[in-house]
Amino acid sequence: MDNVLIVVDNLEATKAFFLELGFELEGETIVEGPSVDRLIGLQNVRATLVFMRTPDGHGRIELDKFHTPDAIRTGPEKAPVNELGIRRIMLAVDNIDELVARLLVHGAELVGEVVQYEDMYRLAYVRGPEGIIVGLSEQLR
């Protein structure tokens, strides 16, 4: 897998959220023109793309802010975890309590609770800007 695309309205807040999660900025560009229109099946596309990678370099996300045409929302911003479609990405973390506390200070919300799964993992779901849900997994063994 090369990357996961997340379409956002507030690009700066979303970028800051993923930086706080430990992602690293890989690059930023604007795309537009007939080839972009043909690729994604829209007309008059102009978008800012931000590429970010996980600290280990193995995972990447692409944050897209559409300037034209406007992005559309088809459901609630804070969709429940059981709504159809991609609901979250899961990240392996070293200190879940410290990271959750840091994210909450920056405006994220805990979806449920930090829980322990048997003696193997501590897990949490955190909702950030744009209603994006990120799962956090701290391995205990």
Image: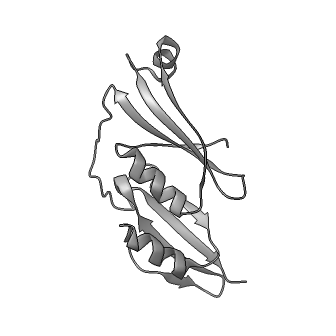
Q: Nearer the viewer, residue 28 or 83?
A: 28
Q: Residue at x 43, y 68 (%)?
A: 126
x, y (%) of residue 54? Answer: 65, 55
Residue drawn at (52%, 82%) of the image: 97
Query: Residue drawn at (67%, 43%), measured in percent from left and top?
Result: 1
Q: Note whether residue 88 is visible.
A: no
Instruction: Estimate the x, y position of residue 79 in percent, counting from the top left.
Output: 32, 57
Q: Is residue 19 above or below residue 135?
A: above
Front residue of this view, candidates 31 and 138: 31
- Number of marks: 0
> In this rendering, does residue 101 appear at all?
yes
Q: Residue furthest bottom?
A: 119
- The image shows residue 117 at horizontal and vertical percentages of 57, 82
Residue at the top extreme, as displayed: 34
How is colour applied across the structure in the image?
A: one colour
Question: On screen, 73 above or below 15?
Answer: above
Question: Dividing the image into 4 quarters, which one contains the C terminus?
Answer: bottom right
Q: Position of residue 60 (x, y in %)?
A: 62, 47
- Give the residue drawn at x 62%, y 76%: 138
